[in-house]
């Protein structure tokens, strides 16, 4: 299973939340691979043909395609930016087409109100690409008080929301 970190903002908190999610998803039923889009660093979509044709010319496109094909499920972890989801995540999704079809996916969005608008926006894309969206899609409520000044998650600050990840873990264990 893949956990895609869908933010590349230099001062992002996505890796901190991602570590917390990863630790709480730990299961003997599956392995979770963290895919950090800031490290994968896909350029702005640069293929000549549309992704639906799967005529990838660039090595990064071929590698991204193979990686997504190899995963039983994908969890997208991303913040809400301006009532939507980050462009780096949209770009990573847009590189592919058929690789997303019937892919089991879950959305974990976060923001001061849990990132609901970002999930709604990504839902439209998931429907269009025929992703198999799971029923558990946690909204993580955050605020500045749960992080240090250097963006480190203060231990235990998200623990009140662990049950959301536990529900997702149970669903994943039943389908993988």
Image (spheres, rainbow, N blue to C red):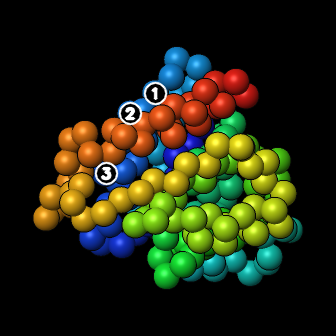
> Could you classify mark 2 by the number of other residues whose Cα lies within 10 Å: few (under 14), some (14-19), or many (20 or more)?
few
Q: Dividing the image into 4 quarters, which one contains the N terminus?
A: top right
Give the CA separation, mark 2 to mark 3.
11 Å
The answer to the question of whether label 1 and label 2 lie on touching residues, with beta carbons closer than 8 A, is: yes
x 15%, y 63%: residue: 150
State the residue position of label 1. Answer: 26
Residue 67 makes an appearance in the image: no
Tell me the number on the disc at residue 23. Answer: 2
In percent of width and height, residue 27 lies at: 50, 22
Q: Where is residue 93 in the image (x, y as percent from the top left)?
A: 66, 65
What SS does tag 1 mark? loop
Residue picked out by circle 3: 16
Of callouts 2 and 3, which one flags the residue occurring earlier in the amino acid sequence?
Answer: 3
- Element at badge 2? helix
Q: Which residue is drawn at 40% across and 48% down?
A: 18
Disc on the earlier residue, 3 or 1? 3
| Residue 174 percent coordinates (x, y) | 70, 24
- Compute the Cα span from label 1 to label 2: 5 Å
């Amino acid at each position: 299973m893949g956990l895609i970190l869908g933010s590349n903002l230099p001062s992002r908190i996505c890796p901190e939340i991602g570590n917390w999610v990863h630790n709480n998803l730990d299961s003997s039923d599956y392995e979770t691979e963290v895919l950090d889009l800031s490290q994968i660093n896909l350029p702005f979509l640069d293929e000549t043909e549309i992704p639906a044709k799967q005529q990838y010319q660039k090595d990064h496109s071929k590698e991204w395609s193979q990686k997504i094909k190899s995963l039983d499920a994908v969890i997208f972890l991303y913040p809400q930016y301006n009532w939507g989801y980050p462009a780096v995540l949209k770009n990573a999704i847009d590189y592919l087409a058929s690789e997303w079809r019937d892919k089991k996916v879950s959305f974990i969005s976060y923001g001061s109100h849990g990132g609901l608008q970002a999930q709604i926006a990504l839902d439209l894309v998931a429907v269009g690409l025929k992703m198999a969206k799971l029923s558990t899609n946690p909204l993580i409520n955050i605020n500045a008080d749960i992080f240090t000044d250097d963006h480190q998650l203060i231990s235990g600050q998200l623990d009140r929301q662990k049950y959301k990840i536990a529900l997702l873990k149970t669903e994943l264990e039943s389908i993988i």
